[in-house]
Image (cartoon, rainbow, N blue to C red):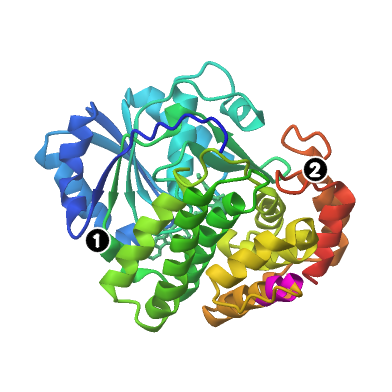
Amino acid sequence: MDNFTFYSPTYFVFGRGEENHTGKYVKRFGGSKVLIHYGGGSVVRSGLLDRVKASLEQENISYVELGGVRPNPRSGLVYQGIELCRKENVDFILAVGGGSTIDSSKAIAAGTVYDGDFWDFYQGKPVETALPVGTVLTIAAAGSEGSPDSVITLEDGMLKRGATGEGLRPRFSILNPELTQTLPPFQTAAGITDIMAHLFERYFTNTQEVETTDRVIEGLLMAMIHEGPRVIADPDNYEARANIMWAGMIAHNNCCGVGREQDWASHGIEHELSALYDCAHGAGLAVVFPAWMTYTMPHNVMRFAQVASRVWGCQMDFACPERTAREGIEAFKKFLKGIGMPGNFKELGAREEDIPAMAHSVCYGNGGNGTVGGFVKLKEEDVAAIYRLML
Ligand code: NZQ
Ligand code: ZN
């Protein structure tokens, strides 16, 4: 295991009805003038926004609102949010929604207190200070409720890039699984896929002797394999929703990624797809991850065979571990199909002719030096070959 530091200061509040106490937590974490930021309207339709506002009013906290965050959140709204926060002297950003709303909130939080262009943070500048952010989460997926990251798409060129910095970790996050019961099945499934992807990005490592985090990751993957089909069959199943929601946080606040090299090539490969075709991030990952696994499996057959036997229950073939490894990848594909995820470029609306440009951007965009990934360092031609496996 490698040396590491781990600091995850977010205060989590979990369970039924907890969004009605939002005002209390905003106050506890120092907010007196709040920007409530939200998406395309699900929180208005469900009545959540009104409940959150009522709880702020109960604590005599004033607020302004900015809705309209789109999935794969855009830079334009971030600029608007920064302007609004400065004009209104906002001192706390409250994200009410999913990963896109939280990421847009984090971008506004960092940009408001920064003299330059907020996009600098999405080109490699670490975020050191930002306004405090709190979240009321409505979808289990991105893990942004506990992560120091934010992903935004620059409209000029449709570049999807990430920023990171400890200042971006939310001060508090309210997780009520009931709020996820209004999700369409496709979004629920895309969220489960993203959670599993965050676990796999950490699982595929060259670091030796990481049994503790290996076993935590395997356990979380098994929980998703158990709960995924249950929640798709019965969207109102609170317990399944609750287990998925907490897994989404643990999968990405890095408690199971510490002390080991991680990969993250699949996320880079997927971000090109969601930037270009505006697909749901989790749906893009459902197409990317099995292809990435197929391509990189020869690098460490035993690690793939291990996950196949421990997580997917495949019989270990000691004479031919590659066969076990392949069975594991097939089991993953079957699972994804079973929860309604796409399996190829066509189902995503992606085009073969865009492969060379996307492969180049994965390896050289975002300050890249020509390769992507920690487990296997992929060059542009490898990434292009992985895209072709998705056709
Ligand atoms: O906008 P509204 O109307 O709210 O609708 C949303 C949106 O259409 C809908 N939705 C969310 N909660 C709902 C609901 N509909 C009904 N009932 C509810 N309770 O679902 C759609 C997707 O929402 P979004 O916020 O985009 O989903 P998600 O949480 O998957 O976020 C995806 C974004 O997060 C980024 C992705 O790249 C993508 O841009 N990521 C952020 C990370 C981070 N900050 O740490 C890490 C991830 O790997 C990921 O890259
Ligand atoms: Zn993700």
Query: Which part of the image, by quadrant, shows the C terminus?
Result: bottom right
Mark sitting earlier along the chain (2/1): 1
Q: Residue furthest top?
A: 115
Q: Which residue, given by chain and number where applicable, does mark 2 sit on?
A: 363
Q: On the picture, is 334 further left or further right than 169?
A: right
Residue at the far left: name it.
58
Mark sitting on residue 47: 1
Q: Is residue 124 above or below residue 333?
A: above
Relative to 292, say whether 95 is above or below: above
Question: In this rendering, which labeled residue sits more in front, label 2 or label 1?
Answer: 2
Please say if 375 is above or below 304.
above
Which of the two residues, 244 or 255, is positioned nearer the viewer here? 255
Query: Which type of secondary structure does the marked residue at label 1 adopt?
Result: loop
Q: Does the CB distance between marks 2 and 1 fall below 8 Å?
A: no
Residue range in magenta is 321-327
> What label does residue 173 carry, if any?
none
Tell me: is circle 2 under 8 Å from ligand 1: no
- The stretch drawn in magenta includes residue 323: yes
Question: Residue 242: x, y in percent?
Answer: 30, 64
Residue at 54%, 65% in the rendered image? 193
Q: Is residue 289 visible?
A: no
